[in-house]
Amino acid sequence: MASTSPPLKDELDIVIPTIRNLDFLEMWRPFFQPYHLIIVQDGDPSKTIMVPEGFDYELYNRNDINKILGPKASCISFKDSACRCFGYMISKKKYIYTIDDDCFVAKDPSGKDINALEQHIKNLLCPSTPFFFNTLYEPFRDGAVCVPTAASHGLWLNIPDYDAPTQLVKPLERNTRYVDTVLTIPKGTLFPMCGMNLAFDRDLIGPAMYFGLMGDGQPIGRYDDMWAGWCCKVICDHLGLGIKTGLPYIYHSKASNPFVNLKKEYKGIFWQEEIIPFFQTLTLSKEFTSVQKCYIELSRLVKEKLGTIDPYFLKLSEAMVTWIEAWDELNPPTKHSSK
Amino acid sequence: MASTSPPLKDELDIVIPTIRNLDFLEMWRPFFQPYHLIIVQDGDPSKTIMVPEGFDYELYNRNDINKILGPKASCISFKDSACRCFGYMISKKKYIYTIDDDCFVAKDPSGKDINALEQHIKNLLCPSTPFFFNTLYEPFRDGAVCVPTAASHGLWLNIPDYDAPTQLVKPLERNTRYVDTVLTIPKGTLFPMCGMNLAFDRDLIGPAMYFGLMGDGQPIGRYDDMWAGWCCKVICDHLGLGIKTGLPYIYHSKASNPFVNLKKEYKGIFWQEEIIPFFQTLTLSKEFTSVQKCYIELSRLVKEKLGTIDPYFLKLSEAMVTWIEAWDELNPPTKHSSK
């Protein structure tokens, strides 16, 4: 372990949705042990999650979530990794890093272990440049028109996190190309956000990092991070915040079952033909000056414009409101900056 | 030399604005010799440009340009590398590659010589994806919403092509990072185009690739490629065409003099504070369905909106119209596709 104090040690929580694999924390020990972990158990609360010694952590299962949120717990998904967003809400830190338990330490082209968290922190602390495309890839340079960075989207080597149809068509595809750069995603451009290796600033964008209604009792799964990414991007564009993508890489060890995935995704695959144009064309008026206000307005638009696709979106729209109410209850406005 | 026929051998011209350095063509011989070169001499027409044996080329100096274009030659810059755009106009090929004479063959991380032209051709022949940000960097994949690629913007190792103030502040900065990717520049996002290592499809975007009025008799220099890049990008966005940036790299061997550059640039540095917002906010109505129509409309807007900054923009606006007239004269509409 490094002898100097790890960056943002007291300002960052690591949120993990269940840990099925004990090797996971052992592998990350040199990088994660200094930080506080929030583990959100996604399935049966009677099962015990084993955490190796030496880690500082808190663990929440479904019973805990129900106890803490009461009826508002309805906005947190069950039996789906989307439940992780409860960890974003319960955290009291400024920064969150979230990672899946099948993501291991990757190596850079020189063979050195990549400290993913350290790179995410660099990304978050360095401004973004969403208004102009920097062909030399520098995320920031003096004099550039820049904005605070709200989120850092890291990538993955080995198994790509594809949708089920792509998994079926390209079962052997592996990502081996290490692209040595970090890019600000330009203003007005959406992107497919993946929750496997993601860091963000709770104060800046936390209330929009809602992973939706997925899994148990819902007609859809696996769109949790995509949904959060679309919502966050339009709100960041509106509020003048940046989202970066690129470094750091993690090593994604195992592909999920494409047939199971297809079942979870197939409605999403239809629906996104309307969801994406919805996000591409929506505008938020100037009166919406905080993430919460933007998100409530977004929930209204989801009801109005997507409600006709399927009753699911009416339920989702209500859950978005419940999520903000629960967020504000756990994070009273006096505590965090209200832009 | 490769034994197979080089790609697009009969469909691509290489345009070079003057050759001061005989090593330049020797170094590129393995890659360029199969292609036809168009050399546009930027300075004194009485000086002779030496071209090594074995190259197939045509050379135009100022006298030739005056003879061919008559009074319309006024739109072609003199004593500035912006004159290269005459080569775009006189070419009869579908594709152009343009490169500066201080750009040499770069090596990839494995030490192999990079065939820049081959990579540009790959970029141009593969569609672009300007509507969505692909986090895995693939320029194109089946099923993605894609558009034809109009231009491929290559990068450079060693000396960055900075503006004079940045050159002065960071005189020792060298670009050594090889970023192994090609990206579509998203719709609605401008970028700083560099003409040192650039390929494009004349049929798709040629008439917008005008390098403006620079150098001798003009109050500004060095903004030739920037200007063309802004114009091309807004027209590509409007017509549903893509521009890519990234690979291939060339090796930029020498920095130009920052003091000389500052003198050429300083008006541009002021003016771009208004020029960039002008391009960021302008919209072209649906009636403008060809590059030529878009460009004439753009010239009207330049006169209307930028003419108040300096009389230079009135002259530039007229030159833009002259350029299109000359283009259409040399490239009668029956010959090339009018979108």
Image (tube, coloured by chain):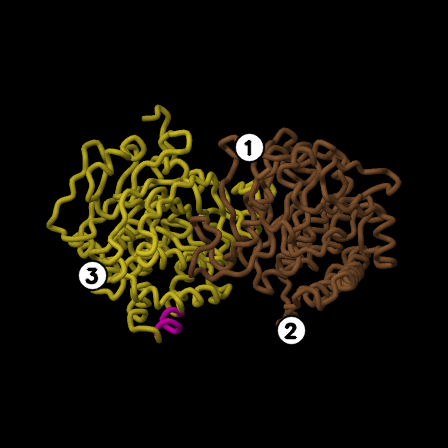
Chain colours: A brown, B yellow
Task: Give the class, few, some or many, for how many residues have Cα within 10 Å of label 3's Cα (few <14, many ≥20).
Answer: few
Residue A287 is labelled as 2
Task: Give the class, few, some or many, for how many residues have Cα within 10 Å of label 1's Cα (few <14, many ≥20).
Answer: few
Residue type at mark 3: give it.
Asp
Q: Residue at x 60, y 65 (%)?
A: A239
Query: x, y (%) of residue A290?
Result: 66, 67
Give the number of the mark in front: 1 or 3.
1
Chain assignment, label 3: B
Q: Are marks 1 and 3 on the same chain?
A: no
**Residue tagged by mark 3?**
B216
What segment carries the magenta color?
A: B301-307
Label 3 element class = loop
Query: x, y (%) of residue A84?
Result: 75, 48
> What's the CA distance linking mark 1 and mark 2?
46 Å
Chain assignment, label 1: A
B166 sits to left or right of A258: left
> What's the CA distance linking mark 1 and mark 3?
50 Å
Residue type at mark 2: give it.
Glu
Q: Residue at x 12, y 48 (%)?
A: B47
**Residue tagged by mark 1?**
A176
Label 2 element class = loop
Label 1 element class = loop
- Depth order, front residue of B62/B99: B99
The prevailing secondary structure element of the residues shown in magenta is helix
